[in-house]
Image (cartoon, rainbow, N blue to C red):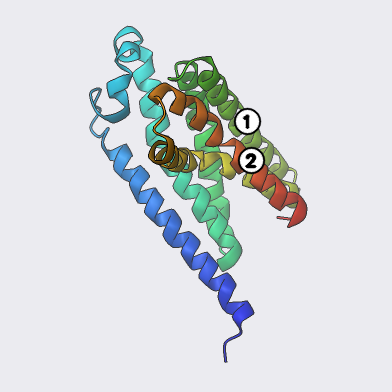
Amino acid sequence: MFSLKKIIPILTKILLIIGFGYFFCLMLKITLEYVPLKTDVSFLMIKQTEVVERPEYLWFFYTHVYTSIFVLLTGFLAILRKNFGWENFHRNTGKIYIFLILLFAAPSGIYMGIFANGGFLSKLSFVILGCIWWFSTFKAFQLARQKKFKEHRQWMWRSFALTISALTLRIWKVIIVYLFHPNPMDVYQIIAWLGWVPNLIFIEYLIRKKHL
């Protein structure tokens, strides 16, 4: 006879996997719009000033887009090892996750943040996001090398909370546009902060109260 206490955590994990899989597929679809290298699709349609005047912008953009999808995937796969005990798998995917963020995804994101739509507030948010994302990932890397695995795990949770801002930003955008129909530039200013600040607050709560 199944215990309800045992079934609920299993169902929760299954729903999380399904939910992540759904949103990951949406992000993959967005990423594939830029394959092969295209300058006149999706997000780049509203960044033509940067595309024309700053040739390097495209390379930072492609670097960010192409690496972030793997960061998202490896981060989630590394988390699964807690439930399945895949120690070597966790270690290897974690290394890829950290490597991609520190060398490619975060630095390119910071550069793109400087030219974000929505004015100063949006630019400030995305630059801060990129810097904290890089720092939290580097801190996790340092602690792993020092074999302080509890602290390493906590900083990795902070890092991943910022990684999934790519998802939560788009979710908030849909909700806000559907409910309030604001000016497009106002939307950028709002979701620029909503995309990651609540994530960080929530994961900090879990770290302190639930001892992640």
From the viewer's perspective, tell me whether residue 120 is left or right of residue 43: right
Say which residue label 2 marks: 200
Question: Badge 1: few (under 14), some or many (20 or more) residues near its Cα, within 10 Å?
Answer: some
6 lies above or below 161: below
Q: Label 1, secondary structure: give it.
A: helix
From the viewer's perspective, tell me whether residue 21 is left or right of residue 87: left
Question: Badge 2: few (under 14), some or many (20 or more) residues near its Cα, within 10 Å?
Answer: some
Asked whether the residues under the numbered discs 1 and 2 touch, taking CB atoms below 8 Å apart as contact, a structural biologist would say yes
Q: In the orientation shown, which residue stands out farthest toward the top?
A: 53
Amino acid type of the residue tagged 2 in the rendering: Leu
- Image spot of residue 56 (x, y percent): 37, 14
Picture residue at 52% right of the left edge, 48% below the top:
75
Q: Identify the mark at residue 19; answer none if there is no mark.
A: none
141 lies above or below 80: above
Q: Quadrant of the C terminus?
A: bottom right
Picture residue at 44% right of the left edge, 38% below the top:
176
Q: CA distance from mark 1 to mark 2?
A: 10 Å
Say which residue label 1 marks: 132
- Image spot of residue 43 (x, y percent): 32, 27
Q: Quadrant of the N terminus?
A: bottom right
Q: Label 2, secondary structure: give it.
A: helix
- Image spot of residue 93 (x, y percent): 51, 50
From the viewer's perspective, tell me whether residue 164 is left or right of residue 69: right
